[in-house]
Amino acid sequence: MIDTLGLRNNKEWRRYCTAGKKPPNIPAGPNKTYKKDWKGWGDWLGTGTIAEKYIE
């Protein structure tokens, strides 16, 4: 679902969340909620961009 929104980065995600469009069952701070498995905003938003620090 997240990748179908067309959001490209953290700034756009925050704007989406504060606009009241985010379903209540999806965390506004996924980087904190899923900290252990977090691979970056590109992974979360489905853009395919992964920050170098998350590449193994």
Image (tube, rainbow, N blue to C red):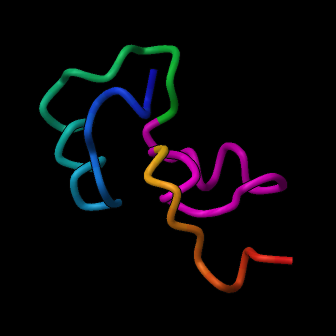
> The N terminus is located in which quarter?
top left
User: Is residue 48 within the magenta segment?
Assistant: no
- What range is drawn magenta here? 28-45
**In the image as oriented, which residue stretches furthest toward the front?**
48
**In the image as oriented, which residue stretches furthest toward the bottom?**
52
Relative to 8, residue 6 above or below: above
Residue 50 placement: quadrant: bottom right
In the image, is 45 to the left or to the right of 32? left
**Total number of numbered labels?**
0
Identify the residue shown where x is 73% and y is 74%. 54
Measuring from the top left, give residue 31's x and y in whole percent: 59, 55
Q: Main secondary structure of the magenta part?
A: helix
Relative to 55, residue 1 above or below: above
In the image, is 10 to the left or to the right of 25? left
Relative to 48, residue 5 above or below: above
Residue 4 placement: quadrant: top left
In the image, is 27 to the left or to the right of 32? left
Identify the residue shown where x is 76% and y is 76%. 55
User: Is residue 30 within the magenta segment?
Assistant: yes
10, 6: nearer the viewer: 6
Measuring from the top left, give residue 44's x and y in whole percent: 54, 46
Identify the residue shown where x is 50% and y is 66%. 49
Measuring from the top left, give residue 9's x and y in whole percent: 32, 60
Identify the residue shown where x is 71% and y is 56%. 38
Relative to 14, residue 40 above or below: below
> The C terminus is located in which quarter?
bottom right
Measuring from the top left, give residue 21's x and y in whole percent: 21, 21
